[in-house]
Amino acid sequence: MPFSKHKIATKGQEIYNQKLQEKLEPECQGQIVAIEIDSEDYFLGTSVVKALKKAKKKYPDKLFYLVRVGFPAVHKRRW
Amino acid sequence: MGAFLDEYNQPKIQITLEGHRTERTIDAIIDTGFNGDICLPISTAIELGLELWACQTTELADGSLKTDLVFIGRAALAGQPMTDVEILLTESEDALLGTAMLLDYKLEVDFAKRAVKIDRSVNLETDSTESTES
């Protein structure tokens, strides 16, 4: 199946909104969650690298969708 | 630590990057408006051979949201040890160094003297502990 970043982002955000938001936001504000969209498994970390390393250890061949818990975006940038 | 003001008065610092294919040392703009690690021109990312790990939502200066690809590589500020870092892509020709790379440092920009200084910040908690023990 061809890679689509928009498919991963749409499915990942849907999983976060429907299954993780209520569970994570009270305790994990500002942490990074890496979501594996097929299994709907997720991994928390205090940084992108930390969350992704945990995720990649269990799913070495998968791509993940990242969310900063409680915020609309993981990062801000000017360009 | 290899930091300076360029001809556009932008603070820059020398960083070394490592991907699967090669290693390169470049000058990156110190961008306090970017809270990630590193943002690279697409051509540099390809040359380095970075590995794609994820997608994420990024907020741009106009408030709009975009989906970014997230690559993992290794990077070091001049003279510092290499660490794993997240790397985003930019269509600009400039590389950006974000504030996530500077959380252990003090950054001083003296525009009048055209000087940029980056030092490891003193860890007050550690100092306090050492002082108590001595």
Image (cartoon, coloured by chain):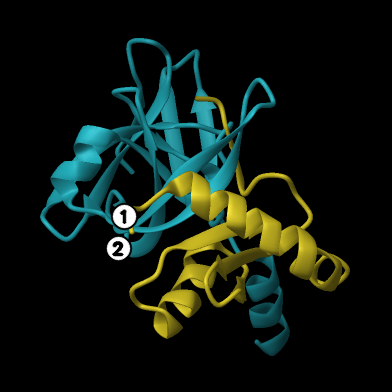
Chain colours: A yellow, B cyan
**Disc 2 to disc 1, how far (Cα)?**
5 Å
Q: Amino acid at mark 1?
A: Ala
Q: Amino acid at mark 2?
A: Met
Query: Earlier along the polypeptide chain: callout 2 or callout 1?
Result: 1
Mark 1 closeness class: few <14, some 14–19, many ≥20 residues within 10 Å: some
Left or right: B20 in relation to A39: left
Picture coordinates of residue A29, whole percent (x, y): 79, 62
Picture coordinates of residue A50, whole percent (x, y): 51, 71
Q: Secondary structure at mark 1?
A: strand
Read off the residue under disc 2: B82
Picture coordinates of residue B37, whole percent (x, y): 46, 49
Chain at numbered mark 1: B
Read off the residue under disc 1: B76
Identify the residue at image location x=50%, y=25%.
Answer: A79
Mark 2 closeness class: few <14, some 14–19, many ≥20 residues within 10 Å: some
Circles 2 and 1 on the same chain: yes
Identify the residue at image location x=66%, y=20%.
Answer: B62
Picture coordinates of residue B84, whole percent (x, y): 36, 64
Q: Residue furthest bottom?
A: B133
Q: Residue furthest left?
A: B22
Vertical order, B29 against A56 (above or below): above
Disc 2 and disc 1 in contact, CB within 8 angstroms:
yes
Image-quadrant location for residue B91: top left
Identify the residue at image location x=75%, y=49%.
Answer: A71
